[in-house]
Amino acid sequence: MELRKKAANMNAGGEERRLPKNRAALYVFLIWTNIMDIFAANLLFLLFSIPVVTAPAALCALSRVMTVMIRNGACPVWREFIREFKTSFWKGMALGAVWAAWMAASYGAGRLGAPFAAAMLPALLGTVSACYAFPMAAGFVLCIRDIIKNSLLLLCGSPGNTLVLMLLCLLLYFIAAVLLPPSLPLMLLAGASAWQLAVCITVKPAFEKYLMREKKRADDA
């Protein structure tokens, strides 16, 4: 895998090349150079989500794979996925319960006659906050309370990243509402991996700006 990682970062002249700085370019680069790992990670996510209740832990594991891929240009998918799935199993279950309750409350508000926009906005914000929470659970040693608190703080305190995540979530809703079932084969092949890679690339600057700074302060203290 180390050879594969090095090969993924080699240009035609045999020299090691750096990962793109631009987030869109980085996304395309990682998809292009790790397409089989993208498929493999997606398959693992689907398999480990089959009991449904284990889906949050599988999402933590998928987030870990994508985070390592973003950092190194490649990732040993099986090793990182299984390790994170075991490590984050109970944490992921708890986070999944929190956000499932959030989404159920938003859905319930709509069923009780609340205007569509009034019910849709909490659901959208809940999805965006989960986009912060699960990569955070996979990348940092934090208790559930701190993950939830930091996710809500980033939701409000990092408006640029939150806006991008909102657009991604709206795209996901559009695909689910309009493009299915024709898009289902592609979604089964790489949908979860492609989505979570985009999410992890989006939240990375906010994590580096806020969480890594707080971690450095704690280490210095």
Image: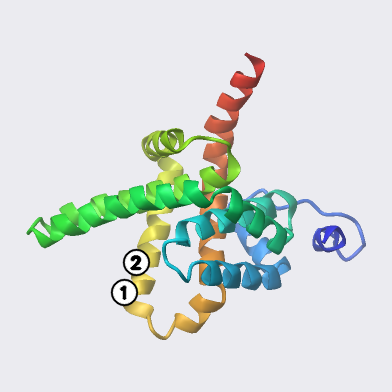
Q: CA distance from mark 1 to mark 2?
A: 6 Å
Kindly give the residue lying farthest to the left in the view shown.
Answer: 113
Residue at 40 percent of width and 38 percent of height: 148
Residue at 69 percent of width and 68 percent of height: 37
Graded by Cα atoms within 10 Å as few (under 14), some (14 to 19) or many (20 or more), the crowding at tag 1 reads few
Judge by depth and name the residue closer to the eye, 27 or 196: 196
Q: Quadrant of the N terminus?
A: bottom right
Q: Which residue is mark 1?
A: 177
Percent of width and height locating residue 21: 67, 48
Q: Which residue is mark 2?
A: 173
Mark drawn on residue 144? none
Residue 88 showing in the rendered view:
yes
Judge by depth and name the residue closer to the eye, 74 or 48: 48
Q: Quadrant of the C terminus?
A: top right
- Find residue 31 and report its image quarter: bottom right
Residue at 60 percent of width and 19 percent of height: 217
Residue 26 showing in the rendered view:
no
Please give left or right for residue 33 compared with residue 3 in the image: left
Q: How many marks?
A: 2
- Label 1 secondary element: helix
Percent of width and height locating residue 156: 36, 36
**Which amino acid lies under the numbered mark 1 shown in the image of this protein?**
Ala
User: Please, is residue 77 above or below residue 203 in the view?
Assistant: below
Kindly give the residue lying farthest to the right in the view shown.
Answer: 14
- Residues tagged 1 and 2 counted as in contact (Cβ below 8 A): yes
Kindly give the residue lying farthest to the top in the view shown.
Answer: 221
Residue at 7 percent of width and 59 percent of height: 113
User: Please, is residue 185 above or below residue 31 in the view?
Assistant: below
**Which amino acid lies under the numbered mark 2 shown in the image of this protein?**
Tyr
Please give left or right for residue 11 compared with residue 56 in the image: right
Graded by Cα atoms within 10 Å as few (under 14), some (14 to 19) or many (20 or more), the crowding at tag 2 reads few
